[in-house]
Image (cartoon, grey):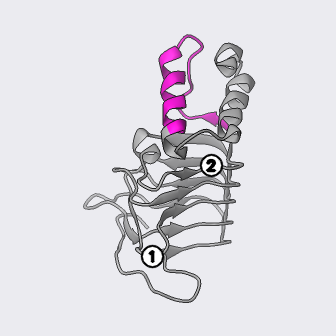
Amino acid sequence: LYGTEVVKPAVRPNTSFSVDVRAGRIGRDLVFTANRERRFHAEGGVNLDGAVVARRVDLTGAVLQSSDRDGIALDVGSVTADEFALVPDIAPRGQVVLAGAHCVTLNDNPELWEATGGLDLEDFRYDSMKVPIGIKDDAAVEQRIRLLRRAMGGYRPGPYDQLAEMLRTSGNEEHAST
């Protein structure tokens, strides 16, 4: 959906998302990025809940806005993929749901974490980060903790435990303890 602009979601029972790929099976990449002329823009949100993507979910440069009805800009709940490229151009307007999702590699940016509706990170698992946190990079760990705290609107242990587990698995035991 390179450069696609979807701005008037269909309002049907149980959904009002502009793009709805719930429980889809994608054999390679699922791409919501810019083309040469414009960005991908979903006014009404994107719902991928439960989709299985063989390789990558790519929202690089996307503009995501919730519909007034449900408040979710992006639902990636229970999605599995090798890589999540969740690097929107601007902070999503609405909530980003990652609950129950799993990816091998997480590629994100600060704009994702500034979603106006926060992030639902319960049971979200990722094995590594596209840009790893260096063993001596204390500032990067502190930044990640600030992003978690702000996005969740408080403390819940699961997302912090996930970060610690990912750091520990990559050999960064000192930062995992932090």
Say what amino acid the circle numbered 2 marks. Leu
Q: Nearer the viewer, residue 168 or 24?
A: 168
Residue type of the residue flagged with mark 1:
Ser
Task: Determine which quarter of the picture holds residue 159.
Answer: top right
Residue 132 sits in quarter: top right
Q: Relative to the observer, which residue lies in front, 175 or 52?
A: 175
The residue lying at 48 percent from left, 40 percent from top is: 150
- Residue 84: percent from the left, percent from the top? 57, 49
The numbered mark at residue 1 is none
Left or right, 32 with reference to 148: left
Characterize the local packing of mark 1: few (<14), some (14-19) or many (20 or more) Cα atoms within 10 angstroms: many
- Residue at figure coordinates x 66%, y 64% from the top left: 27
Q: State the residue at coordinates (53%, 41%).
A: 107
Q: Quadrant of the N terminus?
A: bottom left
Return the residue at label 2: 121
Measured from the top left, where is residue 121 in percent x and y?
Answer: 62, 48
Residues drawn in magenta: 126-149
